[in-house]
Amino acid sequence: MNVLKYFLVGLVFGIVLTKSEAVSWYRIYEMFQFQSFHMYGIIGVAITTGVIGIQIIKRKNIKDIKGLPIEILDKEKGSTRYWIGGLFFGLGWALVGSCPGPIFILLGAGFFPVILVLFGALVGTFIYGLLKDKLPH
Amino acid sequence: MINLKNIIPIFVKKNYGMNIIFQTWPWYVSGFLIGMIMLCLIYFGKVFGMSSNLQTLCSMTGIGKRVSFFDTDWKSQRWNLVVVLGAMVGGFIAANFMNDPSNVAINPKTIEQLAQLGIDAPNGKLVPDTLFGNQVFESPKMILILIIGGILIGFGTRYAGGCTSGHAISGLSNLQLPSLKAVIGFFVGGLIMAHYLLPLIF
């Protein structure tokens, strides 16, 4: 069950992202052209659900599956890394139409050329690891 | 290919409404489920974030001996790789057994615009053949586009410390200002690419 629950969460995630077409290059392009509400609706409802859920967890001090208090870490303070890093990711997101989750989902779905995107993403991650200390954060 | 759509009526006489699982899932259902997935992982004592798996995969190669950023305890992140494995299987099931010709019904205006760029219309397909058909392996230009797109994603998400799942969903749900900055960055980058660079590339 320990491992299985993560597998099941992933399974649902893969099905939802495919059936909502959030993995679709077309949907991402359409979103950035402001020609459909679909993607904005998905992201908006996901965040709304999340905000409500996290507020309930915090106010009712809900414990996690092991009975430990749930602690949600704040993101590190800062600006430069978020603006610039975000910009880089956005350029890639709109070019190949997939964020990291969908890269894996599309590979599973059988779109083999996505392997090139995954390869690039690993190279990009590696480049960041090499340059980390020289970049403004 | 066998499709669940053809099998289910054998077991279910009245399959009215069954079709909705094959059609495009509405944004309010999908958005809610994605929010619940994030909350589920919080309940499991984890964090919803997909791009960190890229760092884990790099760390697994042992490169951490040379580059300290990858000198992490990747075994503690194995749960997230299991999520990825599940997502891949989910993608396989959804794309192969739950598809319908009505899928990916994007705006006709968008299709017209894409035609001008020389990108094929969806006609039920999730992704354009222009970018993800197997013929791309014969085109150095397309290979380069896909790899560069990947590099931007890998570099950008690690620099920003998260992607759509980590910042847009997890971070904004927890009302994190840094995540809002990152998400604005995502959209500025995306708009520049979609409006100014894609027409130059295609």
Image (spheres, rainbow, N blue to C red):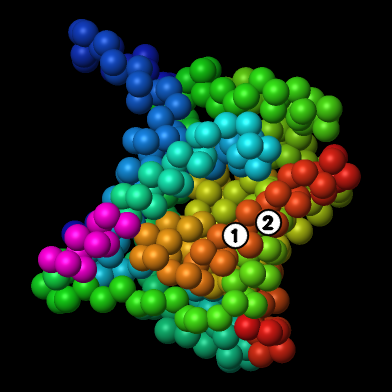
Which quadrant: the C terminus of chain B? top right
Of residue B188 and residue A116, the one placed in the foreground of this image is B188
Residue A115 locus on image (x, y percent): 64, 52
Residue B52 locus on image (x, y percent): 49, 69
- Please tell me if label 2 and label 1 are on a single chain: yes
Q: Is residue B138 left or right of residue B25?
A: right
The boundaries of the magenta stretch are: A51-60
> Which residue reaches farthest top?
B13
Q: Are marks 2 and 1 in contact (CB under 8 Å)?
A: yes
The answer to whether A55 is drawn above or below residue A69 in the figure is above
Looking at the rendered structure, the kind of residue marked 1 is Ile
Q: Please state the chain letter of the residue tagged with numbered disc 2 in the rendered image.
A: B
Few, some or many C-alpha atoms within 10 Å of disc 1 (few <14, some 14-19, many ≥20)?
some
Q: Residue at x 86, y 45 (%)?
A: B201
| Residue A68 numbered mark, or none | none
For disc 2, the marked residue is: B188
Looking at the rendered structure, the kind of residue marked 2 is Val
Q: Residue at x 31, y 73 (%)?
A: A72
Q: Residue at x 19, y 60 (%)?
A: A56
Of residue A108 and residue B170, the one placed in the foreground of this image is B170
Q: Please state the chain letter of the residue tagged with numbered disc 1 in the rendered image.
A: B
The answer to whether B190 is drawn above or below residue A18 in the figure is below
Label 2: state its secondary structure.
helix
Q: Is residue A133 left or right of residue B73?
A: right
| Inter-mark Cα distance, 2 to 1 | 6 Å
User: Magenta region, mostly helix, strand or loop?
Assistant: helix
Q: Residue at x 68, y 84 (%)?
A: A136
